[in-house]
Image (cartoon, coloured by chain):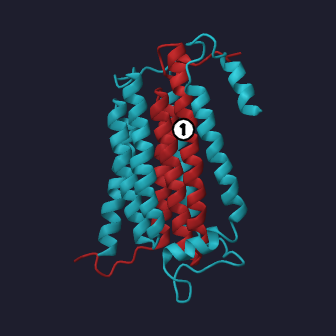
Amino acid sequence: MTAFLFFVAAGAALAGSLGVVLARNPVHSALFLVMTLVSVAVLFLLRDAELVAAVQVIVYASAIVVLFLFVIMLLGVDREESMEDRIPYQRPAAIALGVVLLAELVFLAGHEWATGQRTASGVPLTGDGFGNNVERVARVLFTDFLWAFEITAVLLVIAVVGAVVLARRSGQRPGEGSSVDTDEEVKA
Amino acid sequence: MILGTFEVTDTYYLVLAAMIFTIGSVGVLTRRNVIVMFMCVELMLNAVNLSFVAFAHALDDVTGQVIVFFVLVVAAAEVAIGLAIIVAIFRRRRHATADDLQALKG
């Protein structure tokens, strides 16, 4: 049953990612992206990553894709793009590079020495004594990775401020200051 | 069922992640629409997340799943900033394809 689920989810993920690349309409690409993300969430569940799977569905497949769709609808770029390249050999070169990259990655994935090493103070994924998956992730996240977690908060604040500054219409209202002034305000 | 005794090892997940990553990178190289290129970057990030989770399972260590959270946060910040940049570019010039953005061309 697990193997069956894996192959169904893997096929859906591959079909969805091919659809993202091949669909002419950006809205269709976004919907194929949802298909891939949900399939990858199923694969996360199969590898004992319950919390990550839930976060994947909540954050990625809903929030980020809604943001994509919102921008597509807002800008009206949902018309089909022209597929002619400025450099004529670009697409064959890209596909050839992709084949080489895939060969390298599969070669790496199939080798024993690509398995890495356990962390020194790592919490095991299975076994007794550490609670469920959420407790295990929280135990590592709030001890070993506490500093990175705090930096993450700063990063999100910077992203929010940057998005607001970039998306603001500069020079729209007189007396409000230009975008250059806004940058200085943010730095201060 | 034919797959009843078949064991899916972590290598299968790594190969699948390699395939999704390759599809995403080829998409970044071939598509002209900047928003679709962003979606392909998300595909690549997801492939990396999948290999992190596969390694967490292979090594029996939950740290791999913690790293996925940081990748998710960076991806969310990247999408917010990137889409804001696209909106700003689109206001200035009515197109959002990669070929139009050649102001820095030497």
Q: Which chain is cyan?
A: A
Rendering coords of residue A150 (x, y %): 69, 57
SS class, disc 1? helix
In-front residue for pair B43/B67 = B67
Rendering coords of residue B100 (x, y %): 54, 16
User: Can the viewer see residue A170 in this picture?
Assistant: yes
What is the chain letter for disc 1?
A: B
Judging by the rendered image, the residue that carries numbered circle 1 is B80
Quadrant into which the N terminus of chain A falls: bottom left
Q: Is residue B102 above or below residue A185?
A: above
Q: What's the residue at 52%, 66% (across, down)? A: B53
Quadrant into which the C terminus of chain A falls: top right
Question: Dot 1 surroundings within 10 Å: few (below 14), some, or many (20 or more)?
Answer: many
Q: Quadrant of residue A26?
A: top left
In-front residue for pair B19/A78 = A78
Q: What's the residue at 52%, 48% (across, down)? A: B44
Q: Residue furthest front?
A: A175
